[in-house]
Amino acid sequence: MKKTDYLWGLLSGILLVLSFPDFDFEFLVWISLVPLFYALEGKTPWNSFWLGFLTGFISFLGILYWIIVAVHNYGNVPLIPSLLILLLLVGYLSLYVASFAFLYRLIQIRLGLQTILLAPLLWVSLEYLRSFFLTGFPWASLAYSQYINLPFIQLSEVTGIYGPSFMILLVNTCLFTILHQWSKKTFPLREVAMTGLLLFGSLVYGYWRMGIVDRQALQSPALKIGLVQGNIDQSIKWDESFQKETMKIYERLSYKVADKKPDLIIWPETATPFFFQDAKEFQPIVLDIPNKTGAYLLFGTPSYKIERGKIHHYNSALLLSPAGEVLGKYDKIHLVPYGEYVPLGDYISLGSLGEGIGNFKPGKEIFNFTLPKGKFGVLICFEIIFPDLCRRFVKAGANFLVTITNDAWFGKTSAPRQHLTIATFRAVENRVFIARAANTGISALIDPVGRIFKEGKIFTEEAMNGTIGLSKERTFYTLYGDVFAWLCSGISVILLGLAVRQKRGHHKKPEA
C-alpha cells in the first residue's frame, strides 16, 4: 500500500470526529468516507481491513476520548491503565469499520459487484451488530451526527437510526463513484438518479411528517414537568457527611420548580445517595416534597433486595404520589459493564470502576409508571442509547419517556452533549416527548420530532419547567423494531455467503 492510502484513511477518521458533538460540523459526515473509499480502490480485502481499522480507530478515539476522564478522574483508575482501557475499547469498536472495509472489498472482488448499495447494506448490518454484541455499545452511530438535521432524521420512525445511516453511506458511495468515473470521462447517471431520488424522498417525507406530528402534539393532553438538576460533585456524591446538604439542594430546587405547579417533578439518577427504602433520617425530607408541592416526584435511588439469603443491589427509579405513597419502582435493566457490574463477576474478582455500592444486578422487566393523565417509562443513564429497549416501554403503553442520568462522570467533555443528542432519536422513533434530568447536565425537554426545545447548562444547578404532550401514536418502529436492519443484515449475509463460495472474481487483480 502507498503512504497516501493511510493518509486517506486518516482523513476519513478526522472528518467523522468533526461530524459529531461538540464540533457539530454535521455536513461533513456526507463526505467523510469518500477518502476511505478512494484508499480501498483496488486493494486486497486484508489491506482494506487495516485501512478501515485506521479510520475507525481515529474516529472512535476522537469521539470517545472522554472515557479516560470517567475512568481516571472519577473511577480512580491510574492514568496508564485508564489509557489502556480507552485504547482497548476504541480498538474493539474499530474492528467494525475494519470488517466493513474487508467485506466490502471481498464481495466486490469475488462477485464483481459494483452497486452503490453494497456499502450501505454492510455498514447498517455492522452498526446493528454493534448495538447488541457483547452487551452492545451503539454510541457514535453515523445517524447521531444528524440530530440537528430534523427533516432528514424523521424516517427513523420507520427504520430506526439505520435508515439515516444507510442514506449517509449511500451519498458517500455515490460521491466517490462520481469522482472515480470523472477521471474516465463518464458519469454514473443511474447511481446519481437513485441516490438523489431516495435523498429527496426522505427529506419530503421528513417535512411532511414534521408538520403532522407538530399538529398532533399541540392537540395532545398536556403535562407540566419540573426538572431538577442538583449539580452534585461526583467526588463527594457518596460522602455520607454530604448527604444532608444534597437533600437540601434537591429540596430547594424542587420548591423552586413547584412555583409553576408541575404535575411531575423529576430528579436525576441516584439523586438520593443512600438507600431510600430504609433511610429513616432522610425519608421524611423526600416524602414531604410531593406532599407540599402537590406534584408527583420521580427520583433515582440505589435499592436492594434480599433473595435466598443474598443481598442484590439495583439502580432504581421510584415514583411518589402527592400523598407520599410509593407508586412503583423500576430497576435498571441494561447496566454499564465495569461501571455498574463486572462481567463474570461471580467467577472472576476484578472489582468495579465505579464508586459507591459495588456491583448492581439488572432489573428483569419493563415497567411503566402511571399518573392520572397517562403512563411513562424511565430509562436510566445509558439505557437511552438502546433503541429496542426504549421502544418496548412505548409499545407497552408509555405516553412519554423520562431519562434520568448522572453525567458527572464525563466531566466537561463532549460526552454530555453526545448523550443528550442520542435521546432525540428515541423521541422520533417512537413519536413521544422525552424529559431528561441529569445531575450535572444537560437536563432538557425533547419533542416528538427530535427538537430540543428546552435545555439547561452543564455543571450548574437548574430548576426547569416545561410542558409536554402525551402521545398515543405507535410508530412502525415502535411496533416492529429493527425490521430495516434485519433486512440489510439478511441481504449482507447472502452476499457474503455467495462471495465465500466464489473462489475468485473475474476483475483486475487487486494490488498488494
Image (cartoon, rainbow, N blue to C red):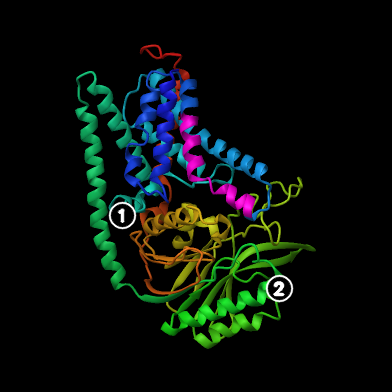
**89 is within the stretch colored magenta:** no
Cβ–Cβ under 8 Å for marks 1 and 2: no
Residue type (three-letter) at the residue carrying disc 1:
Leu
User: Against 234, is 372 above or below?
Assistant: below
Q: Name the residue under label 1.
A: 150
- Residue 92: percent from left, percent from top: 56, 37
Query: x, y (%) of residue 355?
Result: 68, 58
Q: In this view, does 32 lie above or below 111?
A: below
- Quadrant of res 260: bottom left
Relative horizontal placement of residue 461, taking residue 425 as reference (left or right): right
Say which residue label 2 marks: 241
- The prevailing secondary structure element of the residues shown in magenta is helix
Q: Residue at x 71, y 80 (%)?
A: 280
Mark with earlier residue (1, 2): 1
Please tell me which residue is depicted at 66% across the width and 55% down the height of the picture. Answer: 354
Q: Which of 156 and 295 is in front in this view?
A: 295
Q: In this orientation, which residue lies closer to the viewer: 23 or 228?
A: 23
Q: Look at the image and give the residue range highlighted in magenta.
A: 52-73
Q: What residue type is labelled 2?
A: Ser
